[in-house]
Image (cartoon, coloured by chain):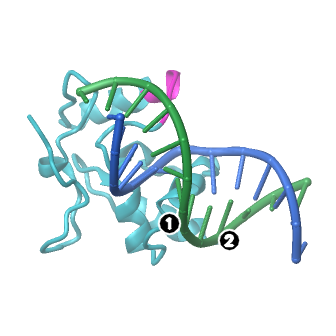
Chain colours: A cyan, B blue, C green
DNA sequence: CTAGTGACCCAAC
DNA sequence: GGTTGGGCCACTA
């Protein structure tokens, strides 16, 4: 299936950086299908290791809930990624950009 | 083919 | 800033 392209992109996320579902979707050619990205990540087999924890939603927050979310947050914090009190990430500084120049998914970010 | 679901996103209140 | 509702598309049964 097409999940592989999603994983491939996620694996390209460098250390200390994060990417939004929308961004991954766009890079994967599934522009506008951010939903599918999350769907793909959900179906990630444990046989392969990918930094799925570096993938977050457009709001800079973790879409998961429960222990998984906590785990993800811990992993991100270990990569020097800062979480705000609301559990949000500063996309302006930590969002991964494959040399993009404009069009940021994050419209308004308040510190 | 039809119906149900989803680790989302955007626009309002 | 937090929650609610609608819409989008791909995948599975």
Q: What residue is shown at x 12% (from left), y 74% (from top)?
A: A101
**Residue A1: assigned label:** 2
- Is the residue marked by circle 2 packed among few (<14), some (14-19), or many (20+) residues within 10 Å? few
Q: Chain of mark 1?
A: A
Q: What residue is shown at x 59% (from left), y 65% (from top)?
A: A3
Residue A39 belongs to the span the image colors magenta:
no
Question: Where is residue A76 shown, x and y percent of the image?
Answer: 30, 35
Asked if one can make out residue A11 in the rendered structure from this viewpoint, the answer is: no
Instruction: Using the image as rendered, state which of residue A34 and residue A66 is in the foreground.
Output: A34
Whether the residues at callouts 1 and 2 have beta carbons within 8 Å, the answer is no
Q: Which part of the image, by quadrant, shows the C terminus of chain A? A: top left
Question: Where is residue A83 shown, x and y percent of the image?
Answer: 22, 30
Instruction: Using the image as rendered, state which of residue A59 and residue A24 is in the foreground.
Output: A59
Q: Earlier in the sequence, mark 1 or mark 2?
A: 2
A47 lies left or right of A90: right
Q: Which one is closest to the eye, mark 1 or mark 2?
A: 1
Per the rendered image, the range of residues in magenta is: A64-69
Provide the residue designation for mark 1.
Answer: A33
Q: Which part of the image, by quadrant, shows the N terminus of chain A? A: bottom right
- Does residue A57 lie above or below A36 as drawn? above
């Amino acid at each position: 299936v097409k999940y592989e392209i999603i994983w491939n992109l996620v694996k390209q996320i460098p250390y200390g950086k994060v990417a939004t579902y929308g961004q991954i979707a766009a890079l994967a050619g599934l522009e506008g299908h951010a939903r599918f990205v999350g769907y793909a990540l959900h179906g990630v087999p444990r046989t392969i290791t990918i930094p799925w924890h570096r993938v977050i939603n457009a709001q800079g927050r973790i879409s998961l809930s429960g222990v998984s979310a906590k785990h993800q947050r811990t992993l991100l914090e270990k990569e020097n990624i800062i979480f705000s009190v609301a559990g949000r990430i500063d996309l302006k500084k930590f969002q991964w950009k494959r040399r993009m120049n404009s069009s940021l998914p994050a419209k308004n970010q308040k510190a």
